[in-house]
Image: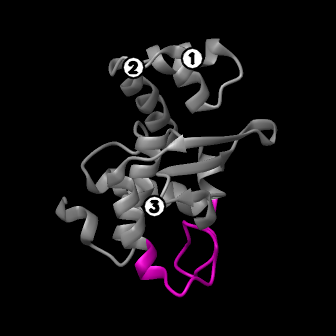
Amino acid sequence: MPDFMQEDDLWLQDKLMLYVFGYTGVRRTKFLSLNWNDLDFKAATLKVMGKGQQERVLPVKDVVLELAWDYLQTRLPLVNKAIFINEKGNRLDRCTLRTRFGNCIAKAGLDPKIYTPHKLRHTFATNLLDAGVDLVTIQELMGHLDPGSTHIYAYECG
C-alpha cells in the first residue's frame, strides 16, 4: 500500500472509497447513499439503487470485500448504517467527498481536476471493454437505459 494512504485516521475508508469507485463504476450520488446492508460479503455483491429506483446488483471483487471487512471492523459497533461517513460519524456528503477524493488523488501526485469519481466510472467501463466484456453487460453494470451512453463511457478514454 502506498505510504500516502496511511497519513491520517481516515486512510482505510479513503482507500475503500477509491476501490469502490474504481471496481464498481457507481455514480457519486449512489456511492453517497451506500449502506452496510447493501454489501453482501457472502454473495460478493453490492446492491445499488439506480435512476428511477431501479435496483441492480453489482459483483464485487475480493480485494474490495477484504478492504470493506477491515474497514467495517474499525466501525464496530455500528452507530450509522452508512458505509462512508465524515469525521463526525455522519453520512459523507458531496462536499466532503469531493475534498477527500481530491486529497487522495493529490497525495498520489495526480491532478484532482482530471481524476474524479466520474472519471473512474469511465475507466471502469473502459476496463470492462478491454477485458472483453460485451456492451450489453457493461450497460447493465453501469445502470444505463440508453446503449448510446454505454458506448460513450466505454469508448471515451478512461
Secondary structure category for the residue under label 2: loop
Q: Nearer the viewer, mark 1 or mark 2?
A: 1
Q: Nearer the viewer, mark 3 or mark 1?
A: 1
Q: Position of residue 23 (x, y in %)?
A: 41, 42
Residue that numbered label 3 is attached to: 100
Q: Is residue 116 visible?
A: no
> Which quadrant holds the N terminus?
bottom left
Disc on the earlier residue, 3 or 1 = 3
> Which quadrant holds the C terminus?
top left
Q: CA distance from mark 3 to mark 1?
A: 33 Å
Q: Residue at x 64, y 31 (%)?
A: 143
Disc on the earlier residue, 2 or 3 = 3
Secondary structure category for the residue under label 3: helix
At label 1, the amino acid type is: Val
Q: Is residue 97 left or right of residue 11?
A: right
Establish if 132 lies above or below 32: above
Disc on the earlier residue, 1 or 2 = 1
At label 2, the amino acid type is: Cys
Q: Residue at x 39, y 51 (%)?
A: 19
Establish if 109 lies above or below 70: above
Establish if 21 lies above or below 13: above
Q: CA distance from mark 2 to mark 3?
A: 24 Å
Identify which residue, 97 or 151, lies in the foreground: 151
* Magenta stretch in the rendered image: 72-93
Residue that numbered label 1 is attached to: 136
Q: CA distance from mark 1 to mark 2?
A: 19 Å
Task: Tell me the chief SS of the magenta region.
Answer: loop
Q: Position of residue 114 (x, y in %)?
A: 41, 36
- Quarter holding residue 80: bottom right
Residue that numbered label 2 is attached to: 157
